Image (tube, grey):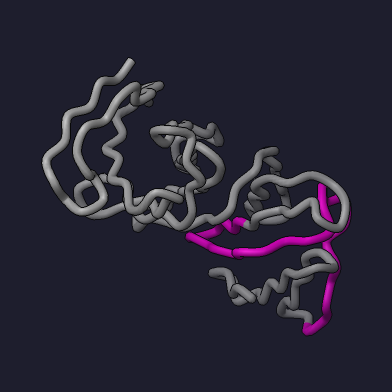
């Protein structure tokens, strides 16, 4: 469950999204792209959910602003929220950033080696820390995300040894 800035309680699960407002009545949200929703997060008047197609519909990221919603199809495992309101969605081979104050566009960053990306966090310096199937990755995005692929890596990166990487 999540409580927004207006005090409305939002509940999500295998049977959709429901809200309990000031009128003290439950309302089921209709017209959604899936029936299962997880990972509710909010920032100001923005409310986000992961949509899961397990029980029908489409997978993706659902964004509510007041009574309107917008859907971004995709396969994400987790979402988190940075202090500035940027949503960080992570999934297979990529991390996507959405800054609601700058428009509703997703900026995608590729995780090296197409690894499965799990939880993600943005630190105060702007770096994105992502748990991956190979360990922890630190990504420092700018406004133009690189499309980087490691061709070779020498050394054991996971235990902190120096390494040399060739990228294309």
Quarter where residue 10 is shown: bottom right
Left or right: residue 63 versus residue 56 is: left
Height in image: 24 above or below 126? below
| Quadrant showing the C terminus | top left
Residue at 54% across, 32% down: 105
x and y percent of residue 34 in the render?
Answer: 82, 52
Front residue of this view, candidates 112 and 147: 112
What's the magenta region?
Answer: 24-48
For this orientation, the residue located farthest to the left is 162
Residue shown at 34% from the left, 58% from the top: 83
21 versus 17 height, above or below: below
- Residue at the spot 70% in from the left edge and 42% down from the top edge: 71
Q: How many marks?
A: 0
Q: Is residue 32 left or right of residue 37?
A: right
> Left or right: 64 with respect to 142?
right
27 falls in the magenta region: yes
Q: Position of residue 128 (x, y in %)?
A: 32, 47
Q: Position of residue 49 (x, y in %)?
A: 64, 57
| Residue situated furthest bottom in the rendering | 24
Task: Where is residue 96? Give x, y as percent.
Answer: 49, 39
In the picture, the quarter occupied by the N terminus is bottom right
Question: Outermost residue toward the top?
Answer: 168
Q: Nearer the viewer, residue 3 or 136?
A: 136
Prevailing secondary structure class for the magenta stretch in the rendered image: strand
Measuring 23% from the left and 44% from the top, which residue is drawn there?
157
């Amino acid at each position: 469950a999540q409580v927004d800035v207006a005090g409305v309680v939002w509940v999500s699960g295998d049977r959709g999204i429901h809200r309990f407002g000031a009128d003290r009545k439950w309302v089921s949200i209709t017209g959604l792209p899936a029936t299962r929703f997880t990972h509710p997060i909010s920032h100001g008047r923005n409310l986000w959910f992961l949509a899961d197609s397990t029980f029908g519909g489409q997978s993706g990221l659902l964004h509510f602003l007041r009574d309107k919603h917008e859907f971004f199809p995709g396969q994400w495992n987790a979402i988190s929220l940075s202090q500035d309101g940027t949503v960080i969605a992570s999934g297979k081979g990529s991390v996507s950033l959405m800054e609601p104050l700058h428009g509703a566009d997703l900026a995608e960053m590729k995780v090296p080696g197409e690894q499965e990306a799990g939880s993600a966090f943005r630190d105060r310096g702007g770096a994105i820390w992502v748990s991956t199937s190979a360990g922890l990755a630190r990504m420092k995005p700018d406004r133009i995300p690189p499309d980087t692929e490691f061709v070779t890596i020498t050394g054991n990166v996971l235990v902190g040894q120096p390494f040399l990487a060739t990228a294309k």
